[in-house]
Image: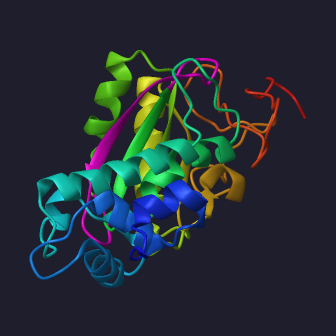
Amino acid sequence: MSRGPWSPRERAAAIGIDRLNDVELLAILIGTGVVGTDVAELAQQLEKRVGGIRALSRYEIAELLEFPGLGLAKATRLAAAVELGRRVCERRWEKGEPFTSSRRVFDHCHLRLRDERRERFLALYLDVRNRLVGEAEISTGSLVASVVHPREVFRPALSLSAASFVCVHNHPSGDPRWSPEDIAITQRLFDVGCLLGIELIDHIIVGDGAYTSFVDEGLPPFDAGRRPGGRIDCAVEGGFGGWSPRGEGNEQVFDTPGAS
C-alpha cells in the first residue's frame, strides 16, 4: 500500500532541511493548519502576503497575529526563528572588544536594522581604547525619521563613564545616503560631546547591504577645523579618535598627536 506525500518534516529528515523550499520551511515552523486550510496552504498564503521570507523580519509578533490562521504560538515561533537566524549571521561585538573601523560598526548592527520599517537610532558607547562598554536605543521613529534628543544620547554615556560614542541609524528606504537632517543632528551631538568631553567619533547610516560613514566620507562635522595633525578641533582631551576608513584587521585605534 503506497503512502501519501511526505510532510515537510519528513522531507527534512529524509533529504536534509537545506533542500526544502521557503514554503516548506515556513510550514515546519507554523506546525499545523486550521479548519479548512492545511499547513502547507497556510504557509504558502503567509509567504505570499508578506512578500517573501526576508520580509518576515519586519513583522512584530502583534502584526503576525493579524494574519488568518496564526495564533500566539505560531506567531512566536516564526518571530523566534527570524531572530535566531539574525543572531547566527550577525557579528556582534561584545563588551571589551574594540571597534577599529566603520565596517565593524556596520557588521555589529546591520542585520537588526536593515529591514526595519521605521527609523531606529542607536548609540554605541566606547572606552578610551574604543572598546564597547554599552549601547542604547535612543529613539524609534516614523517611517521616515526618528527624533533624537542629545540628553537621551548622553545620559547613558555619563552613567557608563564612556570616553566616546558612535551613532548608528537606519534608513527604511534601504538607501544609506545622508540627508540634511542627518548632518544637523550629527553636528549637534558632536558639539555637545565636545562640551562634555565625550567624543562623537562617527555616525553610521545603515542601508540594505551598504552604509555611509560620516568619517569615511568626510561629512560635517568631520570635514573642517582639523588641526595640522589631521585632528578635529574639539575640546575633547586627545582629539578625534577615528579609525582607518572601512579598514579591517589591526587598524590603529587612535591618531598619533602631531602625525602627518
- Magenta region includes residue 183: no
Q: Is 24 placed left or right of 166 in the picture?
A: left
The residue lying furthest to the left in this view is: 35
Q: Is 7 placed left or right of 60 in the picture?
A: right
Q: Quadrant of residue 220?
A: bottom right
Q: Position of residue 86 (x, y in %)?
A: 47, 49
Q: Is 123 placed left or right of 206 in the picture?
A: left
> With respect to residue 182, does 126 lie above or below?
above
Q: Position of residue 65 (x, y in %)?
A: 13, 65
> With respect to residue 101, does 237 lie above or below?
above
Tell me the quadrant of the picture where the N terminus can be found.
bottom left
Tell me the quadrant of the picture where the C terminus can be found.
top right
| Range covered by the magenta-colored residues | 126-146
Q: Quadrant of residue 52?
A: bottom left
Which of 51/143 is in front? 51
Which of 51/14 is in front? 14
> With respect to residue 184, does 188 lie above or below?
above
